[in-house]
Image (spheres, rainbow, N blue to C red):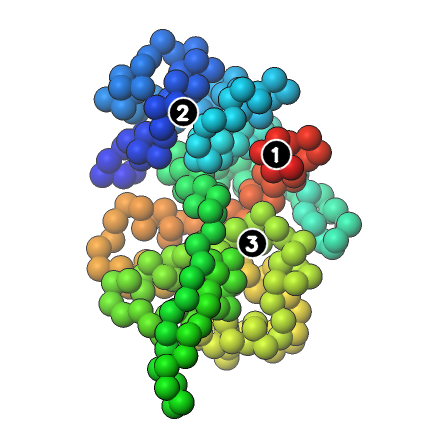
Amino acid sequence: MYGRSVGAEYVEHLTDKDLEVLALAAGVPARPSELRSAPGQVPRMFDRPEVFLAIFGPSAKQMLGVSPFMAFAAMVHRAAAELSSVSHVVERSGARDRVPVFDGPQLADFMDSEARRLFLAELLSSFARVASGQYQIKTSRGWRTVRFSELDPVRLVGLLDAIRGEERSGAYRRLGDVMLFLSGVFPDYARRHGLGPLDAARLLRAAGLHREWDTDMVDEPAIELFERLGGHWYRHACELASTRSARLMVVDEVAARFRQARRTLNFMADRYLFPAGNPWFA
């Protein structure tokens, strides 16, 4: 689907240590240099359950030297395999309530794409380290310093005023990433604390959606609001890009299927990220 193969995109993220672990776990007698020169087989190697067990299994502590991308790619492929055989997954309807939703086949279909699996692995690994910083804006009283964090969409959207041209596409893409990550990995937080009425209204205005959205929804930090904003920002990133690349085509696909992407991340978070005893996310 890419100009480069999806496998080439995988090996770009993987260290030599990752490739050694991958080859050993998958039972493929290949050196890192050999996998880099023939990367097409790499995504299929992640499909083997032994790769997931090598990183997250009960005797995997010696394997914790792998990169975040390696770990998340193994997790994404494991989720794809498990979703292919389930009829329903659990939806969090509150802090403690869990409701079965019979959309397993739809989520399996979403994951039946090497490009979308790569998208999710890249998304998760991109938040292994959260960027933060500060920038200056000019006000009627002079210059003012504003701090931001990637996990604070309200502050992050303020960066749009300081960005021009092609960079705006990247900023909208990252805003979409933040909404998907928060609602997918931390849905309880997104429901309880993610957005207050004022913050929700500000984000809707920044997205140009304040006239379309039911004003009653602004009063609740609802997952539906994250979905609406995230999908909108992904689409806007695609519209503003000067070149319609294959990577952006995947972003456009995720925008159209944002709920399935979010529910897939919910499944992974509940099943792999936060269970007791997980050495990666204790």
At x 31% / y 14%, what residue is drawn? Answer: 31
Identified by mark 1, the residue type is: Tyr
Q: Position of residue 106 (x, y in %)?
A: 54, 41
Identified by mark 2, the residue type is: Asp
How much space separates mark 1 and mark 3, taking CA atoms? 16 Å
Secondary structure beneath label 1: helix
Question: Can you tell which quarter of the image residue 125 is in?
Answer: top left
Q: Outermost residue, bottom direction?
A: 140
Front in this rendered view, residue 8 or 137: 137
Residue 12's place in the image compared with 187, above or below, is: above
* Residue at the spot of label 3: 182
How much space separates mark 2 and mark 1, taking CA atoms? 19 Å
Say which mark, if any, is on residue 272.
Answer: 1
Q: Please report whichever mark, 2 or 1, sits nearer to the chain's N-terminal start.
A: 2
Q: Please report whichever mark, 2 or 3, sits nearer to the chain's N-terminal start.
A: 2
Residue 135 lies left or right of residue 243; in this view the side is right
Q: Quadrant of the C terminus?
A: top right
Identified by mark 3, the residue type is: Leu
Q: Position of residue 265 (x, y in %)?
A: 56, 43
At x 25% / y 53%, what residue is drawn? Answer: 244
Front in this rendered view, residue 105 or 144: 144
Instruction: Categorize mark 2 by other alpha carbons within 10 Å: few (<14), some (14-19), many (20+).
Output: many
* Residue at the spot of label 2: 18
Q: Tell me if I can see residue 104 in this picture.
A: no
Mark 2 or mark 1, whichever is nearer to me: 2
Q: Position of residue 253 (x, y in %)?
A: 40, 49
Q: How many marks?
A: 3
Secondary structure beneath label 2: helix
Q: Please report whichever mark, 1 or 3, sits nearer to the chain's N-terminal start.
A: 3
Instruction: Categorize mark 1 by other alpha carbons within 10 Å: few (<14), some (14-19), many (20+).
Output: some
Secondary structure beneath label 3: helix
